[in-house]
Amino acid sequence: MGAARWWLAALVLAASHAAAAPGQRLQKQGEQVYERCQACHSLETDRTGPRHCGLFGRRAGSVPGFAYSDAMKHADIVWTARTLDRFLANPAKMVPGTTMTYAGVTDAGERKALIAYLQQAARCKPQH
């Protein structure tokens, strides 16, 4: 009976690792996509663009001390996976007048991966 329990535990553990693997692969792919963002953004600090720590649930244009465009300051957006997906697809279309000159991430799979990565990575605490 002990051996049967051991095999059952091993199967459950293997199944849980297999289920986690696609999510981990998606986040890893998203981390690679985020490398393009790092020309202007960082997780912890402001650069040309605002930091991404604490991104989800934050109002657009609200990082203290960051010089946003008037369009972004007045955008009525709270960052969620859905709003970020729309914005990343075409920033200028979603927020006309934004100073973010990046054309966007046109590939839906890349956006999904990037958002999956940011949902984990952006939980950090920003440095002021």
Image (spheres, rainbow, N blue to C red):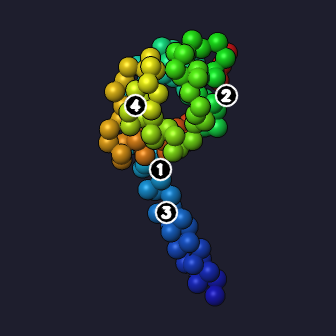
User: Marks 1 and 2: which is nearer the front?
Assistant: 2
Name the residue nearer the viewer: 56 or 23. Answer: 56
Residue in front for this viewpoint, 55 or 42: 55
Q: Which mark is residue 125?
A: 2
Relative image position of residue 67 (x, y in whole percent):
57, 11
**Residue under numbered circle 1:** 24
Task: Judge whether 23 appears above or below 1 on screen.
Answer: above
- The residue mark sitting in front, 4 or 3, is 4
Q: Which residue is mark 3?
A: 19
Mark 4 and mark 1: Cα distance apart in space: 31 Å
Mark linked to residue 93: 4
Characterize the local packing of mark 3: few (<14), some (14-19) or many (20 or more) Cα atoms within 10 angstroms. Answer: few
Q: Amino acid at mark 1?
A: Gln
Image quarter in which the C terminus is found:
top right
Q: Quadrant of the N terminus?
A: bottom right
The secondary structure type at the circle numbered 3 is: helix
- Kind of residue sitting beneath label 3: Ala
